[in-house]
Image (tube, grey):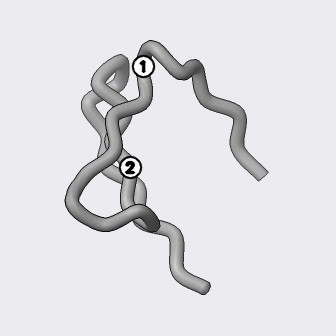
Amino acid sequence: MHTFHPQSLVWTREPQAFEISENKITITTMP
């Protein structure tokens, strides 16, 4: 499980995909 800061977390079009603007990394979580 990953821990992210709300200010650095930006949700994309899909709720399962989120981008970290802090590290400029896009991580997609699959069910």
Residue 8 — which label? 1
- What residue is pinned by disc 2? 18
Residue at the far right: name it. 1
At label 2, counting other C-alpha atoms closer than 10 Å, the crowd grade (few under 14, some 14-19, many 20 or more) is some
Query: Residue 28, position in %: x, y?
Result: 41, 65
Towards the viewer: 16 or 25: 16
Which residue does the image show at 61% across and 29% down from the upper left? 4
- Specify whether 1 is left or right of 7: right
Residue 27 — which label? none
Q: Quadrant of the C terminus?
A: bottom right
In the depicted structure, whether residue 20 falls above or below residue 12: above
At label 1, counting other C-alpha atoms closer than 10 Å, the crowd grade (few under 14, some 14-19, many 20 or more) is few
Towards the viewer: 22 or 17: 17
Secondary structure of the residue carrying tag 1 is loop
In the depicted structure, whether residue 13 falls above or below residue 31: above
Query: Residue 9, position in %: x, y?
Result: 43, 29
